[in-house]
Amino acid sequence: MLELISKLEAIKMLRKLKISPTVQRIEIAQTLLSKKQHMSAEQVMGVVNQEKPKVSKATVYNTLGLFAEKGLIRQLVIDPSKVFYDSNVSNHHHFFNVDTGELVDIGDEELNINQLPNLPEGTVAEGVDIIIRVKSR
Amino acid sequence: MLELISKLEAIKMLRKLKISPTVQRIEIAQTLLSKKQHMSAEQVMGVVNQEKPKVSKATVYNTLGLFAEKGLIRQLVIDPSKVFYDSNVSNHHHFFNVDTGELVDIGDEELNINQLPNLPEGTVAEGVDIIIRVKSR
DNA sequence: CTGCTTGCAAAGGCTTTGCAGAACA
DNA sequence: TGTTCTGCAAAGCCTTTGCAAGCAG
């Protein structure tokens, strides 16, 4: 069984980002933020409502979108229909196994873009997404 | 007006990858491969059928998928609903301006991952996708 | 000829939205 | 009591598919 963070911890994290902590948001936060992991909206849906219906599909989508927008989680786009939400928002990148669909973190020490290329005129960096696609040997 | 590659050049490129050169595929190849560029399926659709209907939507999608699969072009996934096809298949990465939706190449000399991190056990690298999100200042 | 390709429209998967009721401050 | 959220179902968007007709080799 997964060790969840407490309700109070979840509430604290939400408040810190000025997200009002409703029952549903707390549920989702507890599920997703309990450890560093990547989950799809569908997976969140499944886990949250495992025992009994707690959060509707619309709310799961809207909440994940809200969390990502507020910077509580990070959205990872692997493929048009493979979107994951990463509870680890620190600077890191990913391996994606195209055969298994597995998503694995690349350690910050292992791959770190410390010198960005020259950005296009009149722009500032917002984020660097690196996905290394691998396949099973 | 865009300078297109000739029909014969297009056919040669298709044959090289064992893609049988039908009228529609030649149209799309001429449109997309005439220069290094990024186009969405919708854009390809628009350009190809600018004057008169030449290729159906289904065929545009299927053909782009085929080309990508054969390695004639490269699929770039920016966002769940922002897929582009890149006529430049050489090793390079991209800036994506989240404000303008603009996609710009990063020169190979500017950003080159020459040392991959240690791959997960039992996997081999398939591709490295780097997208640096920027916003207008 | 025989299989591959196309186009149309319908189906699909995932996500967002409109809106009424519920919860919150 | 006014505002914010939720849930449901419907709508939306992009893409794929089924199938009959049309081509390529």
Image (cartoon, coloured by chain):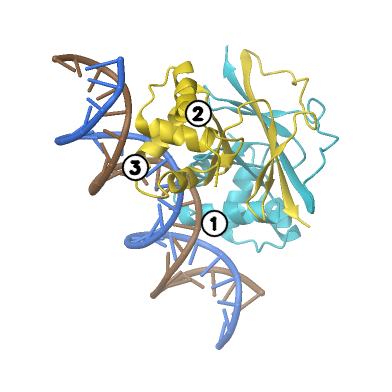
Chain colours: A cyan, B yellow, C brown, D blue
Near-viewer residue (B132 or A32): B132
Q: Is residue A50 visible?
A: no
**Image x and y of residue D11, in percent:** 36, 62
Q: Residues within 10 Å of mark 2 (few under 14, many from 20)?
A: some
Q: Is residue B19 above or below residue B75?
A: above
Horizontally, residue D11 falls left or right of residue A39, namely: left
Using the image as rendered, state which of residue B86 and residue B135 is in the foreground: B86
Chain letter of disc 3 in the image: B
Residue B94 position (above or below residue A103): below
Q: Quadrant of the C terminus of chain B?
A: bottom right
Amino acid type, residue under disc 2 in the picture: Ala
- Of marks 2 and 3, the one in the foreground: 3
Q: Up-down: is B66 above or below C7?
A: above
| Chain letter, disc 2 residue | B
> At label 3, which amino acid type do we have?
Ser
Q: Disc count in the image? A: 3
- Element at badge 2? helix
**Residue at label 1?**
A62
Q: Which residue is mark 3?
A: B56
- The part of the image, by quadrant, that contains residue A1 is top right
